[in-house]
Image: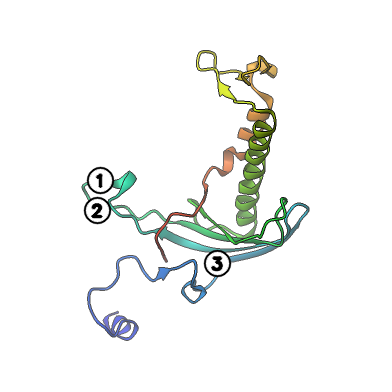
């Protein structure tokens, strides 16, 4: 172990706690893939997903962890890089980095994670465009919890007092709520 460390880190010092650094902008730091898939979609063209297992963000005692007094936890997950050919609005498609809290994902599980994220993104974009176009401000009724009021007197209510659009979306994404877009991690470790 010490001999391997000495060869890998000739500058010496304490062995790193978090493994090698993973930088989004430096492909040479990515290491070996754990899963890779290619899917053809109607809206985005060819979607290529690459995944690395057991990657974790390097947490610091800032923001959410500012009051944490003991050693910070290591939260492992799967990092997914998604590259598509085109965007529905015609913009330039940059790679999208997603982090799933689940580990040991196979190719099918990786596909489910990025597809659930894109469906959620499309749905949110649809509601944002609708609100922009019609000037609608939605709110949730805190008293009854079963209707969406659009501010114009229109209420959406489905069977059993649940909003159909929100209920269907929540049910579709419920098993895969472990997917997050990665945009503010300083670095990740393998």
Marks 1 and 2: CB-CB under 8 Å? no
- Give whichever of 147, 88 is nearer the camera: 88
Query: Residue 116's x, y, as percent?
Result: 63, 46
Residue 135 position within the rendered picture, expressed as x and y whole percent measured from the top left: 65, 28
Callout 2 environment at 10 Å: few (<14), some (14 to 19), or many (20+)? few
Q: Which is in the foreground here, disc 1 or disc 2?
A: 1
- At horizontal 51% and vertical 59% (from top left) the residue drawn is 79
Q: Pointer 1: residues within 10 angstroms few (<14), some, or many (20+)?
A: few
> Farthest residue toward the right?
42
Up-down relation of residue 144 to residue 3 (above or below): above
Total numbered circles: 3
Q: Please report the residue visible at 65 percent of the width from the left and 34 percent of the height from the top.
A: 132
Q: Which residue is mark 2?
A: 71
Cα–Cα gap, marks 2 and 3: 29 Å
Asked which quadrant contains residue 108, the reply is bottom right
Residue occupied by mark 1: 68
Single out the mark in the foreground, 1 or 3: 1
Vertical order, 106 against 140 (above or below): below
For disc 3, the marked residue is: 34
| Above or below: residue 19 compared with residue 165 | below
Q: CA distance from mark 1 to mark 3?
A: 32 Å
**Helix, strand or loop at mark 2:** loop
* Separation of residues labelled 1 and 2 (CA atoms): 8 Å
Which is nearer the N-term, disc 2 or disc 3?
3
Q: Helix, strand, or loop for circle 3?
A: loop
Task: Indicate the position of residue 87 as horizontal and vertical percent values.
Answer: 70, 55
Quadrant placement of the N terminus? bottom left
């Amino acid at each position: 172990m010490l001999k391997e460390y000495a060869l890998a880190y000739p500058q010496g010092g304490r062995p790193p706690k978090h493994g090698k650094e993973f930088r989004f902008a430096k492909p040479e730091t990515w290491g070996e893939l754990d899963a890779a898939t290619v899917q053809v979609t109607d809206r985005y063209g060819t979607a290529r997903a690459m995944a690395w297992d057991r990657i974790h963000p390097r947490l610091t005692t800032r923001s959410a962890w500012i009051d944490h007094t003991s050693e910070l936890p290591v939260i492992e997950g799967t990092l997914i890089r998604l590259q598509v050919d085109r965007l529905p609005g015609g913009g330039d498609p940059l790679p999208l980095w997603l982090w799933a809290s689940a580990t040991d994902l196979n190719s099918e599980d990786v596909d489910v994670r990025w597809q659930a994220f894109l469906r959620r993104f499309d749905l949110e974009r649809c509601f944002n465009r609708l609100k922009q176009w019609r000037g609608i401000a939605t709110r949730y009724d805190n008293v009854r919890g079963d209707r969406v009021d659009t501010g114009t007197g229109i209420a959406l209510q489905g069977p059993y007092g649940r909003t159909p659009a929100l209920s269907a979306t929540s049910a579709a994404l419920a098993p895969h709520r472990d997917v997050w877009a990665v945009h503010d991690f300083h670095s990740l470790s393998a």
